[in-house]
Image (tube, helix red, strand yellow):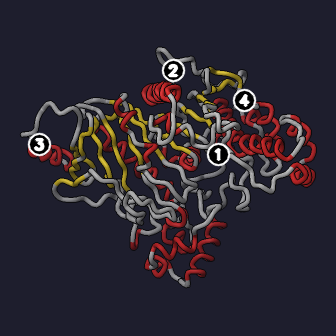
Amino acid sequence: MTLREGLLSLLLLVFSCANTAIASIESAAVTGGIIKGRIVDGIGIFRGIPFAAPPVGDLRWQVPKPVVAWQGIRDAQEFAPACIQSWNPSEQPQPSEDCLYLNVWTAAAASSERRPVIVWIHGGGLVGGMSWEKVSDGTQLAREGAVVVTIAYRLGAFGFLAHPELTRENGETSGNYGLHDMIAALSWVQENIAQFGGDPARVLVIGGSAGAAAISVLASSPHAKGLYSRAAALGGSIFAAGVSDDPRYIFFYPTLAHYEQKGEALFKELGVTELKAARSLRADEILKATEGWPPKYGIIRDGELVQGANHELFAKRRFNDVPTLIGYTSDEAGDPPPEVTREAVEADLEKLPCKHTHDALVAAYPSLVDDEQTRAVMRQSNRDQNVGWSTWTWARLQTANGASPVFVYFFDIHPADKPYGAPHATEYPYIFGNFSNAHTQQDLAASAMIRKYLINFASSGNPNGSGLAQWQKFDESTQRVMVFDEKPISREWPNLAALKAFTPFLQCFGNLPLPSDARP
């Protein structure tokens, strides 16, 4: 008898006297042992399920290790601490290094069901965020037919520090532990989600902001191959024009050598010379030395998990070719700094390289009349350069070099007090059906519609279904995207002229071949 079979037999024995008319699953045998959650309004909720060993002590700055098994029945009714970070929530467990846990919501009546699975990777700049944010509560999506999983991953220096001694210890590379955590969590889903009525062959991995950027990197990593069958990225991706070690260019991912130098500098600042001593430091000492914005640590081109720049890997067809849904909001970039004025922007334009690209780029935006309008134009151009262009390039490269469809959205639902459009991350409440602030009946109707698209996509790889406006897949010849506003419909990509103009401009930073030049 296998360990899993033995656990299942014990589970049946323990709960043989329970009411057989339970509305959903309350207990499950998973990697490590038996867990017991709770049922709330017909939804089985499991919190704080370990998917790896605690990354503490000698396991700090190591790839995640297997779950430590437990005896008896493990309570899974409370959330585990978030991964250590500067932001400390008051209403939940305080952040900790012991944080590699996930949560599950399911309305399945039996484990024999095979419902589509939605795995959420939170954002937060790779330095903050948690798996149990209220906006990502999976109750509503579970009620409508999905099994929902939200995961944690190591952040900041704990998740992305590299150092020569760590590289020697590993034999090849170091850093990217947060990405390895995501892969470990997706592996756990493949091995265990059937116990919750989920279908391991229909797993949608979806992330927002930094979580979306991570998914774009996992999309070209062989380590993630086969762990999911659909992908969605909301407001973030890394398809930059080039690669750089200059931290000013946040849309690049630096090399391992660059991050190893940062690791050496950190050890010197902390007063340690050996890895053993660094692992003995208190977590708060490391956090204090590395916190701040912009983040000091992030995704690394380590040559192993991240084997190169996405635009090169996709052009060579080295990516996980699955149906993909990507998009962003109409006001992704938000308000520019107060020092942005017409005079300052025009002066900066004169200093930029590649002056032959300026005319087309400037023509794509309204003329700079005064400071107020200049700031409005900068909101658009920052959105288009930092988020829109990478999303557009992902859609083009995958469509040109893959077999799976890409569906793109542009989210423009916003209240009257947001005159510039929908801010970053404002699509999340609509996706999960969780609104924490004022909302209208129109918002609730839009949320119900968007959830149908998402569950359809998780189920079949196509968001379309009965009663929904047709969401056209991306095509190079038509460049259509689903625009979510008062009357959602597939239209030409908003501000397409600007995205086209940015391509030759961004080439100046990294010798990027145009996506059309990368066709087979």
The image shows residue 161 at horizontal and vertical percentages of 55, 67
Q: How far apart are marks 4 and 2 (CA)?
A: 21 Å
Q: Which residue is drawn at 39% across and 39% down?
A: 138
Q: What residue type is labelled 4?
A: Pro
Indicate the position of residue 16 as horizontal and vertical percent values. Answer: 8, 40
Give the Cα distance between marks 3 and 2.
41 Å
Mark 3 vs mark 4: which is more N-terminal? 3
Label 3 to label 1, Cα distance in Å? 49 Å
Contact, mark 3 vs mark 2 (Cβ under 8 Å): no
Q: Where is residue 135 in the image (x, y as percent from the top left)?
A: 46, 43
Mark 2: amino acid: Asn
Q: What element carries label 4?
A: loop
Q: Name the residue under label 3.
A: 15
Quadrant in the picture for residue 162? bottom right
- 129 on left or right of 361: left
- Alpha carbon distance from label 3 to label 4: 56 Å
Mark linked to residue 464? 2
Identify the element where label 3 is drawn: loop
Q: Residues within 10 Å of mark 1 (few under 14, many from 20)?
A: many
Q: Is residue 311 left or right of residue 68?
A: right
Residue under the point 39% across and 73% down: 57
Residue 201 appears in the figure: no
- Name the residue that disc number 4 marks: 494
